[in-house]
Amino acid sequence: MINRIEKLELEIPAKNKDITLYAKHVIKSLEDFEDNHRKLVAAQAIAGIRPIGEQEVAFYETVRQMKEQIVSTLVQTIDDLRHKGDKHHEKHFPDGVE
């Protein structure tokens, strides 16, 4: 995920690189959240509390979808930045990107 963001970072002007930095921070935060959850489930398993498989699958799938949505929004933002001033480009964000 971070590699995709770093590739996207090469496509935007230097003055807008802060949005990729923000996206990296959010993705890292979600990865830390996943790691903490994994540790909690492991600690509960040691204590004899069995994890519920469907809930674990739903948790990891939801986090994966959130990461994908963050990257997708970043791609749309970069597309709008690239076409700034192009009156024929249909904006992804009508309120602008700056």
Image (spheres, helix red, strand yellow):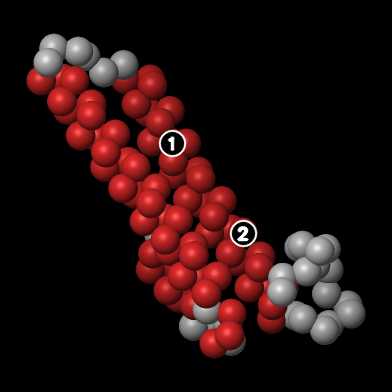
Counting every numbered tag in the picture gives: 2
Please identify, in this view, whether the residue under mark 1 or under mark 2 is nearer the observer.
2
Q: Is residue 60 left or right of residue 12?
A: left
Residue 2 location, x and y as percent?
Answer: 39, 64
Residue pointed to by mark 2: 73
Task: Give neighbour class at mark 2: few <14, some 14-19, many 20+ (Cα, 10 Å).
Answer: some
SS at mark 2?
Answer: helix
Q: Residue furthest bottom?
A: 14
Quadrant position of the N terminus in the picture = bottom left
Depth check: give the residue in front, 95 or 77: 95
Residue 88 location, x and y as percent?
Answer: 88, 77
Q: Is residue 10 above or below residue 77?
A: below
Residue pointed to by mark 1: 61
Q: Residue at x 76, y 63 (%)?
A: 92
Residue 50 location, x and y as percent?
Answer: 21, 14
Amino acid on which the number 1 mark rests in the picture:
Glu
Q: Residue at x 66, y 65 (%)?
A: 76
Task: Give neighbour class at mark 1: few <14, some 14-19, many 20+ (Cα, 10 Å).
Answer: few
Q: Is residue 86 above or below residue 98?
A: below
